[in-house]
Amino acid sequence: MRCPFCAHDSSQVKDSRPSEDNTSIRRRRQCEGCGARFTTFERVQLREIMVIKSNDRREPFDRAKIEQSVALACRKRPVDQERIDRLITGIQRQIETLGDNEVPSKQIGEMVIDGLRQLDSVAYIRFASVYRDFTEARDFEEFASTVREVGQN
């Protein structure tokens, strides 16, 4: 494993344990070059999944992109990190169990938006505003009115 501090190619595992949700292994490592310590996570990958972008470009599925998007939507919201991790793990499992090696990015976006809808209404609106490309205040008003309707059902 390459050191994130000095880019040395070799590190030694000092400690391993399952993550809190038992979906990954947390490893504490020490660089053999500079001696710095860092943490890595090892997750099971069932198969290589390619994401089909809106411009028909293909790229490997990257869990970190979902993590960044959800973290940004939930920023400064009273949502436990554990609930966010469960949401992201659930989305990743859905993608892996679809049976397809290629998944449209639009389908992944809809999974995220559905998950955020259950998690936090403000995070849901934040994500939707970027994902659905809101351009005017009216777009927020129209979308927010549907969120209120969902909350009443």
Image (spheres, rainbow, N blue to C red):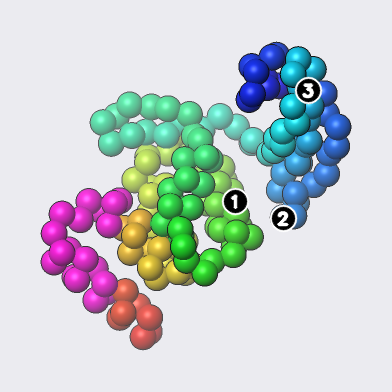
**Residue placed most toward the observer, 139 or 37:** 37
User: Is 9 left, or right, of 68 in this rendering?
Assistant: right
What label does residue 89 carry, if any?
1
Q: Specify start and end residues of the magenta stretch as a single range.
A: 129-146
Determine the secondary structure under disc 3. Answer: loop
Establish if 64 lies above or below 8: below
**Residue placed most toward the observer, 110 or 8:** 8
Mark 1 neighbour class, 10 Å CA radius: few under 14, some 14 to 19, many 20 or more: some
In primary-sequence order, the first of circles 2 and 3 is 2
User: Is 132 left, or right, of 70 in this rendering?
Assistant: left
Task: Give the image location of residue 118, x and y in percent.
Answer: 47, 69
User: Is 7 left, or right, of 68 in this rendering?
Assistant: right
Label 2, on which residue? 21
- Marks 2 and 3 sit apart, C-alpha to C-alpha, by 29 Å
- Marks 1 and 2 sit apart, C-alpha to C-alpha, by 9 Å
User: Is 45 left, or right, of 119 in this rendering?
Assistant: right
Establish if 17 lies above or below 37: below
Quadrant (top left, top right, bottom left, bottom right) of the C terminus: bottom left
Whether residue 150 is visible here, answered yes or no, is yes
Image depth: mark 2 or mark 3 in front: 3
Determine the secondary structure under disc 2. Answer: loop
Which amino acid type is marked by label 1?
Answer: Thr
Quadrant (top left, top right, bottom left, bottom right) of the N terminus: top right
CB-based contact (under 8 Å), mark 1 and mark 2: yes
Label 3, on which residue? 35
- Please give the name of the residue rendered at 37% of the width and 33% of the height, measured from the top-left corner: 52
Which amino acid type is marked by label 3?
Answer: Gly
**Residue 70 belongs to the span the image colors magenta:** no
Q: Looking at the rendering, which quadrant does residue 32 occupy?
A: top right
- Please give the name of the residue rendered at 38% of the width and 68% of the height, measured from the top-left corner: 122
Which amino acid type is marked by label 2?
Answer: Asp
Task: Give the image location of residue 82, x and y in percent.
Answer: 63, 60
